[in-house]
Image (cartoon, rainbow, N blue to C red):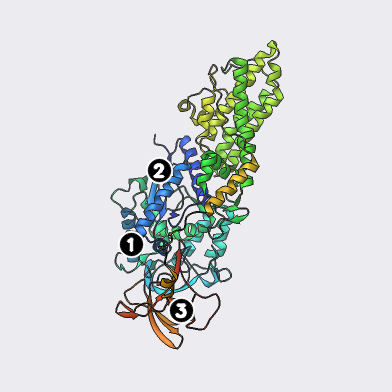
Amino acid sequence: MAKPTYYLTTPLYYTSGRLHIGHAYTSVIADAIARYKRLRGYDVCLLTGTDEHGQKIQRTAEAAGKQPQEFVDGLVATIKDLWQLLDVEYDVFIRTTAEHHERAVQGIFEKLYKQGDIYKSEYQGWYCEPCESFFTERQLKDGKCPDCGREVQWLKEESYFFKLSKYQDRLLKYIEEHPEFIQPVSRRNEMINTFIKPGLEDLCVSRTTFDWGVKVPFDPKHVVYVWLDALSNYITALGYGSDDDSAFRRYWPADVHLMGKEIVRFHAIIWPIILMALDLPLPKQVFGHGWLLFDDDKMSKSKGNVVDPVPLVARYGSDALRYYLLREIAFGADGNFTPELFITRLNADLANDLGNLLSRTVAMIEKYFAGQIPAPGEATDFDASLLELAYTTKDQVEQAMDNLRPQVALEAIWQLVKRANKYIDETMPWVLAKEEAKRGQLATVLYNLADVLRLTAILLQPFMPRTPQRIWEQLGLVASQEAQWEQAVPGRLAAGQQVKKGEAIFPRLDLKAELAAWEEEGQKEEAKPLTPPLAEEVDIDYFSKVDLRVVNVLAAERVPKADRLLKLQVALGPERRTIVAGIAQHYEPEELVGKQVVIVANLKPAKIRGIESQGMVLAASDEKGLAVLTPQRPVEAGSKAK
């Protein structure tokens, strides 16, 4: 009999910078769910990957002095390394620059165009470059991007449009008839009331102002909108649109699309409508989890409050970080991360509860039974309540995980761990050991404790992949024989195993010392080398030959057939000049008119695309893009910059 299938996806991760633990949170959750389903006998496919196209990535690559493909190749390697570090075991890793994906996206675009769901027009509207998202006037929040709060820019360009509005009523009907489709309920209500019922506008699905993307096959000056490109990965990764679509037929529709709440609308509105237009089944569920906050504030590179998971894993281990992410945060709600919360949770749950239970149990078996797990003897008054909980814990974990509630599952496991610690205090094995007549009760107590640890290790496998084996090793058990999920019930432990006390699996941490180490790590991060490094030194005489001046930008326009060039007319005092600047992918012409910028005024004129350029605009670049240099307050045109 064929195994039931389970297809679970994470969103594609942007290759425009290093991932922080907020990103890792999604993949750790997905991995825990996938591991659980595998243990339950499912044929699981966990998909993750990277979103490698778009204007933001192209600009970031340029700022780094690299070609886009070279840039994303390097970052993809670091993302894969991170998933390995966090023990995230994906089945498929999709890259949107993969040839088979690009061909399939072109096929999807062409199919939608031929059937009339995509048409050509002109786009005018607001665009957030960091989010690569289009917004209507009413969707803006205080005139800014409603998702990230950054400034938006007004775009006007020839584009292709996808008929979202055509499918609005059909999508609304589907969501209302399938209340489980968008979860949690707060996200479903937001999609219906904020986006769908006010009216869907047709979606701009191509761009012409940059070229890093999938080319529209019948109109190659256009590239496919990055979200149409990225969302299609959920089916192209399975071979949709290729010569071998067997995986697509095997796993689609997806059981769960998992993502952060800020991108739910793309997955709950745009993606289902694309699938409707392609006459394909919709995913069974779109789940938008909350954000992982740092000290109650959203993690953001611009705020400088991101937490790098790499040094955390190096210091505390991957299981400790995974446990915190899965246990501390109610799935679907926002969660908080601070060094104090992290260390406190590790001490209370991992060191005091689980680690201490294992250490005490093994030590007592070594002391009272020469290191061999005894067979149970006479009952005590406290066995029944412990075993009753042990019998029901597996069912509680299954119910929680089947409802995508890993925090609740771990709470159930820890109730058993805490109960076992209480059982030690109730039965007082050290007292029983003093009376030969009670040796049978002592054997029962230590057997029950070892057995609870055995089944706890089984239940922990989806959440903390490394810890179970360490528990089994100290109990003298062979991991390969103990991993079966069905064995997570009491009474399955064979007596006579030789225990072997090892190092504490989770040593207790000194909060003060750990916070000091955390601060030191942060200072190290701040002191990272300057990139790019400083150029060769020059003396003051050499530098004084460079004449930097402030000019007023009078007019700006694009240079025909040159995507990166703008032609500026500037006022240098009474003089008028023409300057060709390579900033067209970072600024719209109208953004610059009326601005003051700094130029190299005595640069020898040069012909660029047949235009004589009389100077060079100064600009600075970092991973977020390029910015022209402007004075802090208006000064007279022609003023010297010193």
Q: Return the x and y of residue 407 as percentages of the image width and height.
A: 59, 43
| Residue 514 quadrant | top right
Q: Return the x and y of residue 381 as percentages of the image width and height.
A: 71, 21
Residue ranking furthest to the top: 436
Q: Label 1 belongs to which residue?
A: 111
Q: Residues within 10 Å of mark 2 (few under 14, many from 20)?
A: few
> Which is more N-terminal, label 1 or label 2?
2
- Against 334, is 223 above or below? below
- Against 475, is 349 above or below? below
> Which is more N-terminal, label 3 or label 2?
2
Q: Return the x and y of residue 427 as percentages of the image width and height.
A: 70, 22
Q: Residue, x 52% and y 22% (percent of image)?
A: 476
> Label 2, label 1: how many angstroms apart (C-alpha)?
29 Å
Could you tell whether 400 is left or right of 535 in the image? right
Toward the viewer: 516 or 218? Answer: 516
Q: Is residue 178 visible?
A: no
Q: Which mark is residue 549?
A: 3
Q: Return the x and y of residue 603 as percentages of the image width and height.
A: 37, 77
Could you tell whether 229 is left or right of 594 in the image? left
Of tags 2 and 1, which is closer to the observer?
2
Of tags 3 and 1, which is closer to the observer?
3
- Helix, strand or loop at label 3? It is strand
Q: Residues within 10 Å of mark 3 (few under 14, many from 20)?
A: many
